[in-house]
Image: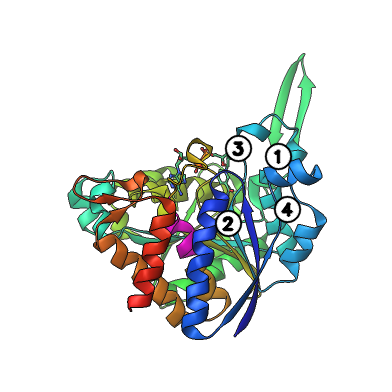
Amino acid sequence: MKKKITVIKGDGIGPEIVEQAMLVLDSVASRFSHSFEYQPVLAGGCAVDAFGTPLPDETVKACLECDSVLLGAVGGPKWDGLEPALRPEKALLGIRKQMGLYSNLRPAKLFPELAEASPLKAAIAAEGIDFLVVRELTGGIYFGEKKTVIQDGERVASDVMLYSEHEVERIARVAFDTARKRRKKVTSIDKANVLESSRLWRSVVERVADEYPDVEYQNMLVDNAAMQIVRKPSQFDVIVTSNMFGDILSDEASMITGSIGMIPSSSLGDGTRGMYEPIHGSAPDIAGQDKANPIGTILSAAMMLKYSFDMEQEAACVEEAVERVLKQGYRTADMAEEGKITVGCKQMGQLIVAAMEEQ
Ligand code: NAD
């Protein structure tokens, strides 16, 4: 198969981790006789520096004309002081909106080899952590009207949290369809005791749940969910939630699996074209030092193979290679352990490619 991949390396550790994921994709291509053509484009802080905008038109065009997008991360202190429209994160919101990517899938899985790196008690981690956060990505409070006004002599700011029925219904369907391929359990997370938008969310998800009698379904308030994720993570299979709650809960979920550097994500709309990126940011504190963990990006490339290119076997080959390298005792600095071998970003990528070739 021939696939065109738009590559956005971005800022900070972005270039280092994406390069390793591309080596892994090259190895998949030669092993399974595929051809991946990469189109590199700029977005984020580096695009502000080069073009004066975080999301150049050429980048949007490349994202709309490819088979999928692979992204590292954007942002960093250099661009923190810019006005909101020029901030690097604007690029991500813009790409998601332009590509119509409304569902963000973030798996939280604890590899048994990393149990020691999880901050949870061994007994809780031993029960297993393997759930998927399905986060709504193009609606909610991040996209609602924002304003700051002067009222009674002081500044008053507001962000509108708005959801329409069709937005909730389509993300609920993604969650239930995905649960059917997993352990058939959906937990919808909201704040329906306080928020009107959550009451609408709950009523629509409940209606969709009726169409999936084979999938177990429950609601949970977001404050309780934040607690349950650390108390008994094994109870979750698929979590479906709004943009902001999903943003926060998936970072919490990443921490209990050992390191934020391990977690991939996919963003999809109605078609097969998606955007794939690790859930972490650009980690400016370790950028350019060959210390970054490339596994979240490599597993994001594996998700691209599975969800956008229908290459199940190829994705499994990458995932198994990651597990094998962890079993062999190799770790990047973020998950370093006594008695294990700490390696840099490049070496971790090379080890994973070597493990693929051994299979
Ligand atoms: P971050 O995720 O970049 O870093 C948080 C901590 O985790 C840091 O200590 C960092 O060194 C570590 N870390 C993250 N990824 C790692 C990896 N692959 N390997 C090893 N360690 C890793 O979050 P932050 O510090 O809050 O944000 C830094 C910048 O990234 C900000 O400008 C922020 O806006 C941006 N950001 C971008 C994205 C994105 O591009 N999708 C997401 C979140 C934050």
Q: Quadrant of residue 329?
A: bottom left
**Dot 4 amino acid type:** Gly
**Residue placed under numbered mark 1 in the picture:** 87
Q: Residues within 10 Å of mark 4 (few under 14, many from 20)?
A: some
Q: Secondary structure at mark 1?
A: loop
Quarter containing the C terminus: bottom left
Name the residue rendered at 18%, 48% in the picture: 339
Which residues lie in the magenta part? 293-300
> For this view, does 42 lie left or right of residue 121?
right
Q: Quadrant of residue 346?
A: bottom left
**Dot 2 amino acid type:** Trp
Marks 2 and 4 in Cβ contact (< 8 Å): no
Distance Cα–Cα, label 3 vs label 1: 10 Å
**Residue placed under numbered mark 4 in the picture:** 94
Disc 3: residue Cβ within 8 A of ligand 1's nearest atom:
yes
Q: Furthest residue to the top?
A: 153
Relative depth, front residue between 107 and 309: 309
**Residue placed under numbered mark 2 in the picture:** 201
Q: Secondary structure at mark 4?
A: helix
Check residue 76 in the rendering and tell me which mark sits there, or answer none.
Answer: 3
Q: Quadrant of residue 120?
A: top left
Q: Residues within 10 Å of mark 2 (few under 14, many from 20)?
A: many
Q: Secondary structure at mark 3?
A: loop
Relative depth, front residue between 37 and 299: 37
**Dot 3 amino acid type:** Gly
**Dot 1 amino acid type:** Arg
Distance Cα–Cα, label 2 vs label 1: 30 Å
